[in-house]
Amino acid sequence: MYNFEEYFEAATVAEALDLLVDHPDLTVIAGGTDVLIKMHHGQLAKASLLSIRGIQSLQGIQQLEDGTILIGPLTTFTQVINDPVIQGQIPVLAEAAASMGGPQIRNVATIGGNICNGATSADSAPTLLALNARLKLQSRQGERVVPIQEFYLGPGKVDLKPGELLTAITIVPADYQGYGGRYIKFSMRKAMDIATLGVAVLCRLREGNILADVRIGLGVAGPTPRRCPEAEAYARGKAVTPETMKTIGRLAVKSTRARTSWRASKEYREHLVAELTRRALRAAISRAGGEGIA
């Protein structure tokens, strides 16, 4: 069923990095919900695997003294959903995690694998984009930090160089404190389906009804997850009105590169972007303290 040539397990990051140098053709596997499917369909025939599942330092979530939230890439989606730091500080990420697959998948699938797979349909990606998440990537040569907006290079392609591992996802206080957020996943089935579109919106208010900041992350609106800079720039400083929200939705479409597939036509996806951005923004405004004004 799964045709692989070699299998290694690493107990530490240092051990994993050494193995990646000594065996450059290794495919890293964590939860396995993406890699094993590819192997089953023959896309990774005779692969050599490196399991990093047992690396304790890459698991869990913590809030540092300065307020930065650090998410280990081996944290499962179930752990993200139930974590008190996530629930208390960035519940929109728990909302996105809860939309991913079914309970069995969420129990083993990791947030790091969801990012590194490079899929535009990754349920965590739009929210992490809207949160301005930063990714710590480590190799034997050292560590670098990449904004998640720069990590996605193309369909299924990410800025993960040979010999590198994702070791942490970080979100600084300025990017979540005072914000309300909402993630909406649209799919053809009500449960356990790949997104036809995913929309995450974060917003912060001032003076009761002025949009101080709006961030919009989209999944399946192009070959990679993406932000909506034109809509975000328009929103800043605007009063919350039905017309403002409609305009933000329309401008979000300009950031898409939607295409027609068996799941949905290009035109239908663009309609969803405009409508779901507006709906997510209304909910985000309410969660930011603007209940009753949207």
Image (cartoon, helix red, strand yellow):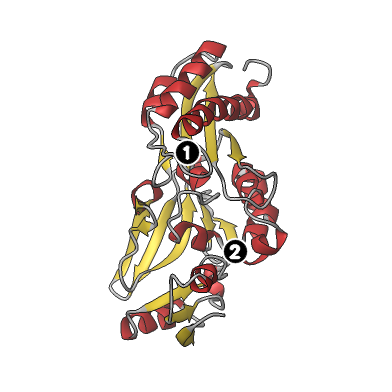
Residues 273 and 243: in front is: 273
* Residue lying at 40% horizontally and 41% vertically, measured from the top left: 222
Label 2 Cα neighbours within 10 Å, binned few <14 / some 14-19 / many ≥20: many
Residue position for label 2: 109
* Residue lying at 47% horizontally and 46% vertically, measured from the top left: 172
Residues 152 and 65: in front is: 152
Question: Which quadrant would the N terminus be assigned to in this image?
Answer: bottom right
Left or right, residue 203 beside residue 22:
right
Residues 236 and 282: in front is: 282
Q: Where is residue 95 in the image (x, y as percent from the top left)?
A: 64, 44
Would you say residue 183 is visible in this rendering? yes
192 up-or-down from 237: above or below: below
Q: Residue 106 carries which label?
A: none
Label 1 Cα neighbours within 10 Å, binned few <14 / some 14-19 / many ≥20: many
Residues 229 and 207: in front is: 229
Disc 1, SS: strand
Q: Which of marks 2 and 1 is nearer the N terminus?
A: 2
* Residue lying at 43% horizontally and 74% vertically, measured from the top left: 44
87 up-or-down from 107: above or below: above
Would you say residue 236 is visible in this rendering? no
278 up-or-down from 121: above or below: above
Residue position for label 1: 217
Separation of marks 2 and 1 at Cα, in angstroms: 21 Å
